[in-house]
Image (tube, helix red, strand yellow):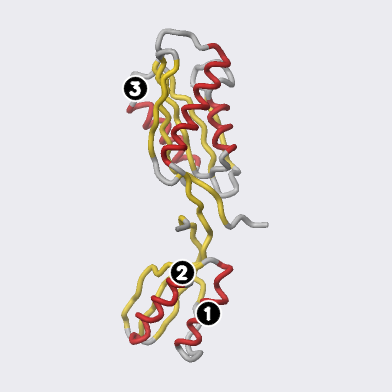
C-alpha cells in the first residue's frame, strides 16, 4: 500500500546537552533527498569547525527507504547508530541530525558516548517538535468569477487548501485536497456550478497537516 502520510520535524533547530564537560549539540534539518542531507552535514562541520566530531544520521523519504549513519571518528557504533535509532524510533522521514561534540577532557566510554549522542538527539527533537505530512491531490477547476468567493470558503471548510486563482476570462481556482475528500469536494463544486464544472487533477504534493 502506498504511503499517504508520514512524520517529520516541525522546524529546523538545535539543542545542546553537557555530559562530563563534553558538549553535544544536535542540529536538525528537514531535507528532501540524500544529497541535501550530506550537504547539511558539511555545513554544520564548517560552522562548528572547532568541535572534535560531527556525527550524523539521516532518514529520507516518506517510506524512510534511504538512511545512513556516520560515527566521524568516534568508536564504531557509538554515535551515528544511536542518532539513527532515535530517528527511527520517532518514525521520522526527511530529516538529518548532526551532533557536534566538543571534548571536555573526560573519556565517556562506549556506553557513555552511546547514551550522550542518543540523548542529544532526543532533546533536540523534543525542542523542534514533529508534524505529520500528508499526500494531497493538486486540482484546478474553472468557474464563473462571481462564484469564486463562495467556492473558496466551501473548499476551505472541507479541508482543502486554496493555492491561487487565475482571473483570465473565467476564474481558474487551484487547490490541494486529501484524496479521501475528493468526492465531497466534487459534490461541492457540482452544487455551486449546477454541474457545469468538474475539478481535474494536475498532480500531487506533500503538505504539512494543520
Residues packed near mark 1 inside 10 Å, few (<14), some (14 to 19) or many (20 plus): some
Residue at x 46% of width, y 67% of height? 176
- The residue at the point 58 percent across, 37 percent down is 88
In the rendering, at what x and y percent does residue 21 appear?
40, 13
* Distance Cα–Cα, label 1 vs label 3: 55 Å
* Place of residue 32 in the rendered image (x, y in percent of width and height, measured from the top left): 47, 46
Q: Going from the N terminus, do you reach mark 2 or mark 3 first? A: 3
Residue ranking furthest to the bottom: 194
Q: Disc 1 designates what residue? A: 186
Please report the residue visible at 55 percent of the width from the left and 51 percent of the height from the top: 6
Residue toward you, 92 or 34: 92
Mark 2, other Cα within 10 Å: few <14 / some 14–19 / many ≥20: many
The part of the image, by quadrant, that contains residue 31 is top left
SS label for mark 2: loop
Question: What residue does disc 3 label?
Answer: 49
Label 2 and label 3: CA atoms lie apart by: 45 Å
Residue 74, numbered circle: none
Q: Which of marks 1 and 3 is nearer the N terminus?
A: 3
Callout 1: helix, strand or loop?
helix
Q: Do the residues under discs 2 and 3 have CB atoms within 8 angstroms?
A: no
- Decide which of 58, 180 is in the foreground and name it: 180
Q: Where is residue 53 in the image (x, y as percent from the top left)?
A: 44, 20
Q: Position of residue 134 (x, y in %)?
A: 52, 57
**In the structure shown, which secondary structural element does the residue marked by tag 3 occupy?**
loop
Q: How many labels does the image show?
A: 3
Give the farthest residue toward the right: 1
Check disc 3: other Cα within 10 Å, few if <14, some if 14-19, many if 20+: few
Q: Pointer 1 and pointer 2: residues touching (CB < 8 Å)?
A: no
Query: Residue visible at 47% across and 68% down?
Result: 159
Q: In this view, does 186 lie above or below 16?
A: below
Q: Name the residue under label 2.
A: 160
Cα separation, mark 1 vs mark 2, equals: 12 Å
Amino acid at each position: 500500500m502506498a504511503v499517504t502520510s508520514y512524520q517529520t520535524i516541525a522546524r529546523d533547530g538545535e539543542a545542546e546537552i553537557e555530559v562530563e564537560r563534553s558538549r553535544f549539540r544536535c542540529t536538525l534539518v528537514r531535507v528532501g533527498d540524500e544529497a541535501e542531507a550530506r550537504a547539511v552535514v558539511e555545513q554544520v562541520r564548517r560552522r562548528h569547525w572547532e568541535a572534535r566530531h560531527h556525527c550524523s544520521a539521516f532518514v529520507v523519504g516518506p517510506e524512510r527507504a534511504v538512511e545512513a549513519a556516520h560515527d566521524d571518528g568516534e568508536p564504531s557504533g557509538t554515535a551515528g547508530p544511536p542518532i539513527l535509532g532515535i530517528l527511527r524510533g520517532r518514525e521520522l522521514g526527511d530529516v538529518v541530525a548532526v551532533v557536534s561534540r566538543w571534548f571536555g577532557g573526560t573519556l565517556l566510554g562506549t556506553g557513555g558516548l552511546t547514551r550522550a549522542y542518543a540523548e542529544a538527539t532526543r532533546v533536540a527533537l523534543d525542542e523542534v517538535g514533529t508534524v505529520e505530512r500528508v499526500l494531497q491531490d493538486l486540482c484546478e477547476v474553472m468557474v464563473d468569477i462571481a462564484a469564486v468567493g463562495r467556492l473558496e470558503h466551501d473548499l476551505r471548510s472541507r479541508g482543502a487548501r486554496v493555492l491561487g486563482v487565475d482571473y483570465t476570462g473565467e476564474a481558474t481556482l487551484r487547490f490541494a485536497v486529501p484524496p479521501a475528500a475528493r468526492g465531497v469536494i466534487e459534490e461541492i463544486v457540482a452544487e455551486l456550478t449546477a454541474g457545469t464544472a468538474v475539478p481535474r487533477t494536475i498532480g500531487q504534493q506533500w503538505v504539512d497537516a494543520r
